[in-house]
Each structure stands twice: as C-alpha cells, then as structure tokens.
Amino acid sequence: MLDDLLLRVRALFSRTAVDREIDEELRFHIDRQIDAHKKAGLDDAEAVRRVRLEFGGLDQIKEEYRDALGVRIVDDLWRDLRLAVRSLAATPAVSVVAALSLALGIGANTTIFSIVNALILRPLPGITEPERLVTMSSGNNNDTGMSNSSEPRWSYAFWKSRTGQHRSRVRSRGLPPASTSPWAAIRNPWTART
Amino acid sequence: MGSERLDLPQGTLDLLILKALALEPLHGWAISERLDQISSEALLVKQGSLYPALHRLERRGWIKARWGISDNNRRAKYYELTRTGRTQLEAETSAWRKLTAAIARVLETA
C-alpha cells in the first residue's frame, strides 16, 4: 500500500525522471533484442524491423506504462487544465464576457435565493409552533352566510377575536382541546357557529 | 518462429512474470527471453506489454524494481520477487492448476 503510494507520488512529481527511466528501460530492451537478432544472423535493418514488430508501438507502450503507474487521471486533468488556460488567454474578450455573465448569473441567483430562503424556506422568527399556522382567505362562505363585503372587519384583530371565542365554544361542545388539533380550534367553529 | 503462437489468456501474463522471477532478479528483456525459452516459443508475449504488466505488479507490491548493471555493462532495471509476490505466485499457481484441471475434465467428459 505504501509502496504503491510512493510510486504514484514519484510518478506525479518527478515526472521527467520517471519518463526518462521508462525510456531508458524500454531502450535497453530494444537494444538487447536488436543485438540478439544480429547475433542470430540478421542484418541491421532487418533486426530493427523485426524488433519493432515484436515490441509493439513504442508510444503506445509508454502510454500504457504510465497508465499502469496510475497517474493517468491526474496527468490528463493537468493537461486539460493547461489547455483551458491557454485557450482562455488566447481570446481575452470572450473570456471576460463569459466570466462577467457567469458573475451576473451567479450573483442574481444568490440574491434571489437569499430572499426566498429568508422569507419562505426558513421558519419566521418568533414562531415556535409553525404547524399551528393556517392560511386564511376571505371569500363567500355559504355555510356561515358571511361574506367579505365589509372590508375593515377582515383584519387580523377580527380573526383573532373570533378564533378566541370559538376555541372556548368548541371546547364546550366536547371536541378535543385545541392543543391537540389546532385546525379544529380555528376552522370548525365556523360551522359550529350557527 | 513461423509456427503458430498462442495468445495469452487474460491475466496469465502476471503469473508468468512472477514465475520467471522466482529464481532470480531479472530485467525486462531477460524476462521475455526466459518466457520464450521455457515455453519453447509457443506463447506469444508482445514484448512491449511486458512493461505495463511489470509496473502493475510493482504497484501491487509483488515485485520490486531496482536499477543495476547488466552483463553488457549498461544500466538496467531489475525486478525481483517480494515476499508477498512469492505467496501470490503460489496462490495463483494452485488456482491455475485447479482451473485448468476443471476445464480439462469438462472437455473430456462432454
């Protein structure tokens, strides 16, 4: 495990040294093989040709070798990164526009999200039992015969006084206490009222 | 040379390399020579593919590489079996024997 790590670290940071070693190692093999063929009676050109066939593509082998080192991903990433920087530098105007539009987009998104986050996603400050909140809207309700015609009455104070009343009335009619069912306390009374 | 040579099944090159190194440390070229000799040149090992394989084995800690001087006075990278490599060789050899025996049985009875 440690060996593996050391090998990889070395392959990453002393790249040229490792590359040189790979070159040297492969070169050694190729030379030896050429010698062997020459000893077997082949002429120089034929020996070289034969070795090339036996050995396979040198560049491909080197690539595979580096693959086996396990640093291919980092290598490729590094190469891509440099290419990216180079091409950005080659067209500065486009790069600046791209960066600006990104900045604007991210800025706008962040702003909108902060607002949404503060207003909608996070519980409002001071509300300890959000499950007891209800949404109310005024409109015609045939059951009660009430309508929203008298605008000023539909105020918070009005609703508050109503719910206060009805809660006690609900209790008196034997429904569960308001604390177990906040809906019952607030909604039921309107039907119970008549 | 012209006769038919067998391609190595996937994964067997590692085993052959371990076996070739069992006697003494060798450099890459000598490993390929030894494999040729022992197999009477029946196995086709693309020489280049030896090196990535060697490196794989090194990373697994089964062999160790070290630079030395070859018999023709050049710097060469020698590979030797580590202790875990030796255990691995034994394990893989017996696994290979079991596998080939099982396959042979199937082929003969069928």
Image (tube, rainbow, N blue to C red):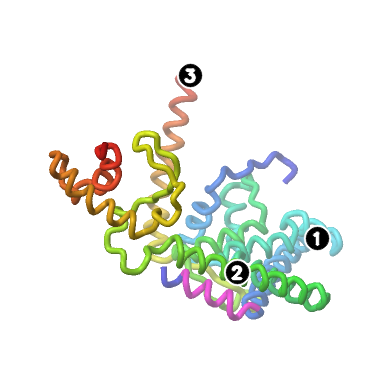
- Marks 1/3 same chain: no
Q: Counting other residues with Cα less than 10 Å from the Cα at mark 3, is it few (<14), some (14-19), or many (20 or more)?
A: few
- Mark 2 and mark 1 on one chain: yes
Which three-letter amino acid code belongs to the residue tagged 3? Ala
Does dot 3 land on a helix, a strand or a loop? loop
Which residue is under mark 3? B110
Mark 2 and mark 1: Cα distance apart in space: 38 Å
Q: Which residue is mark 1?
A: A47
In the figure, is residue A159 to the left or right of A56? Answer: left
Query: What residue sits 80% from the left and 59% below the top?
Result: A41
Q: Is residue A144 left or right of residue A115?
A: left
Q: Is residue A156 above or below residue A19?
A: above
- Segment tinted magenta in the rendering: A4-15
Which residue position holds label 2? A74
User: Which numbered disc, 2 or 1, marks the residue closer to the eye?
Assistant: 2
- Expressed as whole percent of the image width and height from the top left, the position of residue A85 reads 73, 76
Camera-side residue: B21 or A23?
A23
| Residue at the image position 45 percent from the left and 53 percent from the top | A151
Counting from the top left corner in percent of width and height, residue A142 is at 39, 34
